[in-house]
Amino acid sequence: MAATDLERFSNEEKRNLSLGGHVGFDSLPDQLVSKSVTQGFSFNILCVGETGIGKSTLMNTLFNTTFETEEASHYESVVRLRPRTYDLQESNVHLKLTIVDAVGFGDQINKDESYRPIVEYIDTQFENYLQEELKIRRSLFNYHDTRIHVCLYFITPTGHSLKSLDLVTMKKLDSKVNIIPIIAKADTISKSELHKFKIKIMSELVSNGVQIYQFPTDDEAVAEINSVMNAHLPFAVVGSTEEVKVGNKLVRARQYPWGVVQVENESHCDFVKLREMLIRVNMEDLREQTHTRHYELYRRCKLEEMGFKDTDPDSQPFSLQETYETKRKEFLGELQRKEEEMRQMFVNKVKETEAELKEKERELHEKFEHLKRIHQEEKRKVEEKRRELEEEMNAFNRRKVAVETLQSQSLQATSQQPLKKDKDKKN
Ligand code: GTP
Ligand code: MG
């Protein structure tokens, strides 16, 4: 088909036709549902909140089960992310649920870097997905998607305001994950204080430009409930796995000397609202937002960083092949430049070392000459001393011989004198 024919064909208006009878493609949605059910779903929750704020209890309460958990100590030197994955089943729907705990959050003396491991964890999950997408042989169909779909941010029920750590962390996370802020242990704060606390939190989030997840209002079926629930944020929740008898029913509650706080009683706390919004109404939207908004942003930034773009400076579509070739050339050029730089560096280093060695040799030679001179000087001095000593010894010996001669002469003289006297006497 010629190019012009192709253009005309694609520009042609689509015509509506009516069918003569039932064909069967109206079962497409059912086919989709059945396929999804067979495939199963994955949902990943990140819990951020200080140690002992009630994260594990809330997870157990939300999913009405007991997840394995161990208490964190308050002495972690850095924040550590601990993911645990569980297979859950409700009716015939399988859910691969991953709960990620930010262990040690808020326990360090210096909290400046507390958000970093969390951001890095989220980015790593995006990166893993991107790498799978970029593979030649992709297996996204059975890929275990670990991207975080929602971050439940546990706010301490101080009744005052958010801590700077909360604001900084949420600000760093808001472009990467859907944040649902919740006031934890809401049974420790009175009703009127809670109302003021919620308003304060929301105004602080707005004034600091923190974007939290808004339940979607574009789908008519859930628009009303979602817009009502948006006004209730942040949810004030109570968690408990303990069952208490109220009337003649066993309910999950926290029992105090003065009364019982029922987890699923909407006049006691917002637990039911959270469960409805998170699991029953918006789980799919959270998954979708993660893919279409947060992951898309990560992917775009990453690909742009790698040099890929959709249009060139003249707004012409940019082909992947061209980008690849340009990048390859750039890379090879850079590699050559680096190689040359390294070769030059090596040559310089060798020259430097050679010069250093020569200098060392010269110094050694000088030292040797110096020592040689000293040695010769000393040798000369010793020689002189020896000569002097020899002369002295000779002089001494001469004197000694002279003295000995004199002594023997005088001895002879004295021995001859008495004989002479005797002779004289006889005569
Ligand atoms: P780490 O994992 O060690 O950081 O703790 P966590 O945040 O998982 O807290 P966890 O669920 O272990 O709860 C800590 C303590 O708080 C336990 O004694 C819980 O019974 C209690 N707790 C949990 N939820 C609530 C709540 O809603 N209200 C009150 N008053 N106490 C709660
Ligand atoms: Mg825990």
Image (cartoon, rainbow, N blue to C red):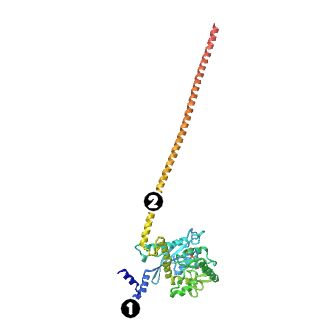
Q: Taking the image as drawn, is residue 424 in sight?
A: yes
| Along the line of sight, the residue nearer the viewer: 48 or 272 | 48
Gap in Å between the C-alphas at discs 1 and 2? 72 Å
Label 2 lies in ligand 1 vicinity (Cβ under 8 Å): no
Residue lying at the far bottom in this picture: please name it.
Answer: 20
- The quarter of the image that holds ligand 1 is bottom right
Give the image location of residue 180, x and y in percent.
Answer: 55, 79
**For residue 216, which numbered disc appears in the image?**
none
Give the image location of residue 229, x and y in percent.
Answer: 56, 84
Q: Taking the image as drawn, is residue 43 in sight?
A: no
**Which label's residue is closer to the chain start, 1 or 2?**
1
Task: Provide the secondary structure element on which disc 2 rests.
Answer: helix
Give the image location of residue 78, x and y in percent.
Answer: 56, 69
Q: Residue at x 42, y 69 (%)?
A: 325
Task: Provide the secondary structure element on which disc 1 rests.
Answer: loop
Q: Quadrant of residue 243?
A: bottom right
Q: Residue at x 56, y 30 (%)?
A: 387
Label 1 lies in ligand 1 vicinity (Cβ under 8 Å): no
Give the image location of residue 164, x and y in percent.
Answer: 61, 74
**For residue 340, which numbered disc appears in the image?**
2
Q: Is residue 284 above or below residue 119?
A: below
| Residue linked to disc 1 | 19
| Along the line of sight, the residue nearer the viewer: 187 or 308 | 308
Q: Residues within 10 Å of mark 1 (few under 14, many from 20)?
A: few
